[in-house]
């Protein structure tokens, strides 16, 4: 099974565009897609999260809904629990640049503990971003290293894991930290064939890398842009199957 661990569908997309997107996933051999909410403000984030929950209810065989909260807010853990109960979210998406928080701060604790309690993976954006009011330092993967040290039971995904940063070593040194291949790996692997095999070597495992595309219904070119370098990886078929979906299925308890 191929699972895209990193897609977005924002409320601006019509249901017709969403249907077209689902067809494109199928055409690209992607069986299921995790959909992450995005929002800079509380109303934006709520609208995004609710829309994803609605679409996942409509297309349960194709879409896996993640929720989101502002972890720096009091009540964030209660809001997360509400999203588990009402929307059936399968994980938490956090974007420190867009949502302007520091993932290494102790205000993270209630939300992270709620995720551990419900066995929900947490995907955190790292690396670049174009949000002028966000602090780039909050998207530093070293923040995730801190967070993982404080919460070793939390399942954390470094989104846009950078093969040439500390990211592979952060994943290697924490049993529950993963990287996704979205954009950053795809960028480098296009320039450097053989990078995928090296990356697995640096991580010391083939069970910590998750394929993702960052595709939106209005950014469909991301599908092949991110999928092709993963398919082209010079690694054993068994490892590639884990990267393309086996590890995701395990994390999401689909397997
Ligand atoms: Zn994304």
Image: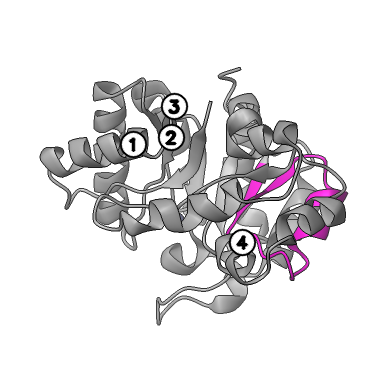
- The residue carrying pointer 3 sits among few (fewer than 14), some (14 to 19) or many (20 or more) residues within 10 Å by Cα, namely some
Q: Which image quadrant shows ligand 1?
A: bottom left
Give the percent coordinates (x, y) of residue 159.
58, 55
Mark nearest the camera among 2 and 3 is 2
Cα distance in 3D space between marks 1 and 4: 23 Å
Quarter of the image for the C terminus: give it: top right
Side of 156 relative to 79 (left or right): right
Mark identifier at residue 30: 2
Mark 4–mark 2 Cα distance, whole angstroms, equals 18 Å
Which of marks 1 and 3 precedes in the sequence? 1
Mark 4 lies on residue: 185
Which residues, given as a range, are shown in magenta?
156-179
Q: Secondary structure at mark 2?
A: loop
The residue singled out by tag 3 in the image is 84
Q: Residues within 10 Å of mark 1 (few under 14, many from 20)?
A: few
Tag nearer the camera, 3 or 1? 1
As drawn, 7 above or below 136: above
Seen in the picture, residue 84 relative to 137 is either above or below; the reply is: above
> Dot 4, crowdedness within 10 Å: few (<14), some or many (≥20)?
many
On the image, the x and y values in percent for residue 217 come to 26, 50
- Of the numbered discs 1 and 4, the one sitting upstream in the chain is 1
Q: Residue at horizontal 63%, vertical 27%?
A: 117
Image point (31%, 54%), residue name: 220
Give the spatial CA distance, label 2 vs label 3.
25 Å
Numbered disc 1: secondary structure: helix
Q: Secondary structure at mark 3?
A: helix
Instruction: Say few, some or many: other residues with alpha carbon within 10 Å of mark 2 (under 14 / 14 to 19 / 20 or more).
Output: many
Q: Which mark is residue 27?
A: 1
Horizontally, residue 235 falls left or right of residue 218, namely: right
Query: Residue 159: within the magenta?
Result: yes
Side of 49 relative to 170 (left or right): left
């Amino acid at each position: 099974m191929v699972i895209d661990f990193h897609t977005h569908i924002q409320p601006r997309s019509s249901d017709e565009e969403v249907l077209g997107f689902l067809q494109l996933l199928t055409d690209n051999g992607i069986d299921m897609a995790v959909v992450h909410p995005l929002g800079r403000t509380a109303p934006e984030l709520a609208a995004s999260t609710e829309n994803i929950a609605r679409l996942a209810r409509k297309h349960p065989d194709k879409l896996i809904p993640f929720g989101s909260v502002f972890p720096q807010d009091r009540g964030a853990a209660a809001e997360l629990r509400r999203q588990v109960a009402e929307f059936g979210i399968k994980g938490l998406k956090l974007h420190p640049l867009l949502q302007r928080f520091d993932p290494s701060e102790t205000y993270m604790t209630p939300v992270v503990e709620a995720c551990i309690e419900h066995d929900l993976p947490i995907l955190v954006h790292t690396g670049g971003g174009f949000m002028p009011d966000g602090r780039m330092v909050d998207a530093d993967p070293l923040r995730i290293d801190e967070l993982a040290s404080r919460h070793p039971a939390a399942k954390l995904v470094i989104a846009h894991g950078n093969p040439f940063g500390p990211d592979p070593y952060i994943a290697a040194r924490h049993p529950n930290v993963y990287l996704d291949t979205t954009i950053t790996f795809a960028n480098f692997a296009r320039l450097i064939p053989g990078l995928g095999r090296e990356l697995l070597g640096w991580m010391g495992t083939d069970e910590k890398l998750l394929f993702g595309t960052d595709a939106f219904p209005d950014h469909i070119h991301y599908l092949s842009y991110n999928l092709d370098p993963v398919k082209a990886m010079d690694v054993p078929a068994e490892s590639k199957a884990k990267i393309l979906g086996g590890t995701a299925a395990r994390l999401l308890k689909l397997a």
